[in-house]
Image: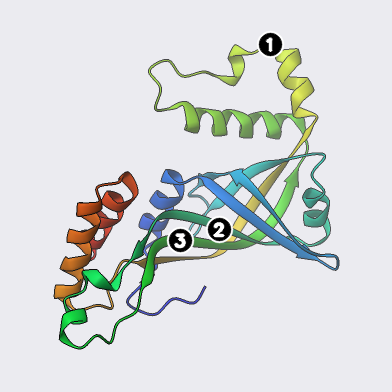
Amino acid sequence: MYSPAQFAENRIELLHAFIRQNPLAVLVSHDSTGLEATHVPMVLDAQPEPHGLLRCHLARANPQWRMLASSPSVLVVFRGAHHYITPSWYATTKEHGKVVPTWNYIAVHVYGQARLIEEQAGLLRHLRELTDQSEAAFAQPWSVDDAPKDYIHALSTAIVGVEISIVRIEGKWKASQNRPIADRQGVIDGLETLGSPQSLEMAEIVKERL
């Protein structure tokens, strides 16, 4: 991922935290037939160090899992907050006018090697991990074990698990760090004035990186 130094983020604890907060990813793979991508929620395991593992599953009807069997190299893309930034928020617009619009965003790219999981025990362990992760915010979390065992077993035969050994992980926090302080404050003010959940989230990120 192209990332100028002021936008690059390589702290593993922050990258892992971001993945856990934004688990829906795009799994990208390729072989001789071309590229394939699937949107899937991921579970992160911080071990083994230094990068950890990702786990997800694909529908057995999805041909991408067969691609992974022969071409295991993958890219997994996680995206967070993003927002359009207008030059009208910059103090320098009035000074010299040499400004252009841009887009602020956060993204984490994971590069790794995929391994298929088809045994029942491994699939059930993954499904429990994924469900527990997603249900943690609820007062009365639903559990895989709440459903009939034969029903879960039948459904699990229709999926293929994927475990990704992370080879490289990199983050990009593009939050106006390349602008003068006055411009960055203008971006914060402008985003806060818009008052949408998306603009307020990005305003906080710009403040953090100020």
Choose between 44 and 141: the one closer to the eye: 141
The image quadrant that residue 92 belongs to is bottom left
| Closer-to-camera residue (170/40) | 40
Q: Secondary structure at mark 3?
A: strand
Is the C-beta separation of discs 3 and 2 under 8 Å? yes
| 126 to the left or right of 35 | left
Q: Which residue is mark 3?
A: 107
Mark nearer the N terminus (1 vs 2): 2
**Residue at 77% in and 55% down:** 68
User: Residue 148, image x and y in percent?
Assistant: 68, 11
How dense is the environment of label 1, judged by Cα within 10 Å: few (below 14), some, or many (20 and up)? few
Instruction: Please give the residue where the numbered disc 1 appears in the rendered image.
Output: 148
Q: Seen in the image, is 54 located left or right of residue 10?
A: right
Q: CA distance from mark 3 to mark 1?
A: 38 Å
Question: Residue beneath label 2, please?
Answer: 77
Q: Secondary structure at mark 1?
A: loop
* 90 lies left or right of 106: left
Mark 2 residue type = Val
Disc on the earlier residue, 3 or 2 = 2
Write the residue at 74% across / 15% down. Answer: 151
Q: Position of residue 139 (x, y in %)?
A: 38, 17
Q: How many neighbours does mark 3 have within 10 angstroms: few (below 14), some (14-19), or many (20 or more)?
A: many
Q: Position of residue 115 (x, y in %)?
A: 72, 51
Q: Is residue 52 above or below residue 147?
A: below
**Mark 3 and mark 2: Cα distance apart in space:** 7 Å
- Mark 2 secondary-structure assignment: strand
User: Which colour style is shown?
Assistant: rainbow
Marks 1/2: CA distance? 34 Å
Q: Quadrant of residue 144?
A: top right
- Residue type at mark 1: give it: Pro
